[in-house]
Structure formats: structure tokens, C-alpha cells
Amino acid sequence: MRAHLQYLLLDGFDPDTGELALRVRVESESAPGLRYLRLKLHLGRTGDPLQPLRRELQTHVQMPIPTLWDRGLKIVIRAVEDELSAPEGRDPARYTWVRTQILHPTDERRGTLTHPIARQAEILWDWALRAEQEGDAGHAIEVLERLLLLAPAHRSALEHLASLLRSESMVEELLEVSDRLLALDPRDPEALLRRGECLLALGRHAEAGEAFGRILKANPVHPLAHLGAAQARSLAGQDPFPHLDAALELDREATLSVLRETFDYRIAGPIPYENAYPLDLLPALLGVTPAEIQAFRDQRGLPVNGHEDTVREPELSRWVNVQNRYQLLPMALHWLAPTPRQIPQLPPTL
């Protein structure tokens, strides 16, 4: 089968080196591992600046440069060279627009070049949706990021980007996008929820609790915000049960699912005089079998220190209390922390 050219995407221009970076998306049955041709065109030199692209296309897909690409790249090169001759021509910010350009091989309407900015944003939006429909989330994210260079306040693009980043577990990037959405609307509950989730993942549970609290201040019956607030309090070593009880009443199925599958029963930071129990002691302490302990660890979120195979006493107490309170296991666990062999000496109080 003959190779098929999908698009040409400009990756930017470096005014210090004169390099115009681009990539070509290709499909070819004869070379299934080939997805992109990546190369740089060197501006300001003698000869044909498009020659590297001509050579790559001929070598890998046995095709000439499409007419629209030939004409479009020459327009871009001319514009860049005009910028370079300006007094501030070495400022990289002057070439941000280069990264927003995408060229279709046969349909000029699907390329951004020569269109007004508003229309360029619409074209990039269409490319992003197509990429997502084709299962290429990475390309969809990249196109949306470039769209936002043209239209920083494009709310639909920000919301769609947030959804994709969340599905790809790109936490720091999602936090940045959530903050941009909150700059547009500080009360946006979805953006606050995403911000709280990101902060939890980054270990910033106090800030996460504040984000969930802002949602609950406006809407006290938001079950996911209660779950988030409970998680933040639990990580801080505080009582999560008021929020867990509220979440259970508002959405029982979702709350039980979170507690069984994703709730983090760890407590951030050490607690003075805490004990830790080896895994081989837990069957006797909890009245279950070693196989059940292994299942609790693998399937029920029992917080085990992976390096030492121990469980901290406060985390074990939290985990057992949640399992029993919400009847997450087929049986109740009988747990009472053993009496310490030595009572720690507390500092005298005034």
C-alpha cells in the first residue's frame, strides 16, 4: 500500500540556530513502525531550505512534497525571515505563532496557515477532536495546548484538555489547567475538584482540603467533594468520618467503591511513639488467615510499607475502622492495639 500523509506540524523556530523544526505524520503498511518523520529546516543558508524534507519524503515514503505544504512552508519561511530582520528578531517569543501551524496535504481548509486567528483556533479544535476519536490522546493534548497559545481563554479547550490529562494521569499538567479554569471562574466546582485531586496526588493535602472545602461551601451536598475532603483529612491524620458519612448518604455506591478501591489509608508524616507491625503478626492481631492479609494488601488498600513489610499502627487502626464502619469486608475485624511493653516518657508539662 502506498504511504498516506496525514499532516505536517510545525514544532517551532529557534532564532539562535535558524532551525525550523517540523514533523510529518505518515501511515504506511510497508513500514508499520514509522509514524513520524522529524526534521529541521535550516533557514538563512544558500540553496533550497525545503531540500531536507524533500529528501526524507522520497527516502521513506517515495512521495514528493504536497503542493500545499510546499507553498505553506515557503510562506512560513518568508514570515520568519522577515521577523528575524526586525530589531527584536532574536526574541523567541516572536515565533510562538509557528507552533500553532498545521498543514493538511490536500485540503487547504484544514490547515491553519493564512486563516484569521479565530478560524485557526477552530481548525485546531477540529484536529484535536479527530485525534481523540482515533484514540490518539497524546496528539489531542498537544493540539489543544497549541490552540491555547492562540486563545488562552478558550474554555471548551481547557475543559477538554483537563479531561484528557486526567485520563492520562498527567497530574502536574492537570493542576496547571485547573488553575487556568479557576482564573476564568473561581467557583467552578469541576475545576476545584480536579485541583483537589491533583494536590492530593502531589502530597499537598492541606491545599487539597481547602479546594474541596470551597466546593462544599457553595454546595454542601456534593458527594465527591466530601470524599475528597475525607481523603485530605485522613492523610493529615485527622478524622475523615464526618465527610465519609455524608458522602455515603449522598452516593452510597460511589463512596463504597472509592473506599474499596482507591482510598489512600496512609497518614502523611510520622506520629510520635507510634508502633509498626510486621505482616506476619497481623493474622493474630486481626483474627484472620495469612492469605486474607495478603488479599487485604492486594485488593483492599491495606497500607503496607513496601520496604519493610510493616503496617503503622495509626494507619492500621484507620483502615480497620473504615472496613468495619462501612461493612466493606464479609466479616468484622476484631482489632485492639496491643498494650505497649514500655510506656514512653512524655515531656513534663508546665
Image (cartoon, rainbow, N blue to C red):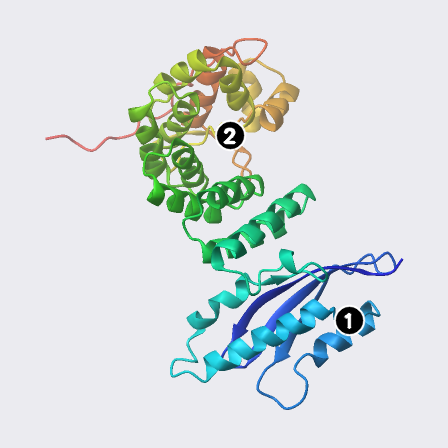
Residue sitting at x 49%, y 79%: 15
Q: Which of marks 1 and 2 is in front?
A: 1
Q: Is residue 226 above or below residue 68?
A: above
The answer to whether any part of residue 272 appears in the image is: no
Residue sitting at x 38%, y 35%: 192
Classify 10 Å Cα crowding around label 2: few (below 14), some (14-19), many (20 and above).
many
Secondary-structure class at tag 1: helix
- Residue 183's mark? none
In the rendered structure, which amino acid carries the disc numbered 1? Leu
Closer to us: 285 or 97: 97
User: Taking 307 as reference, is 338 left or right?
Assistant: left
Classify 10 Å Cα crowding around label 1: few (below 14), some (14-19), many (20 and above).
some
Q: Is residue 26 above or below residue 79?
A: above
Q: Which image quadrant: the C terminus?
A: top left
Count of labels in the image:
2
Q: Which image quadrant: the N terminus?
A: bottom right
Residue sitting at x 41%, y 37%: 191
Q: Read off the residue under disc 1.
A: 57
Q: Farthest residue in the bottom direction? A: 46
Residue 185 percent coordinates (x, y): 34, 39
Closer to us: 258 or 54: 54
Residue 326 percent coordinates (x, y): 48, 12
Secondary-structure class at tag 2: loop
Q: Read off the residue under disc 2.
A: 303
Closer to us: 196 or 26: 26
Residue 215 percent coordinates (x, y): 34, 28
Residue sitting at x 76%, y 73%: 56
Instruction: Choose the circle earlier in sequence order: 1 or 2.
Output: 1
In the rendered structure, which amino acid carries the disc numbered 2? Pro
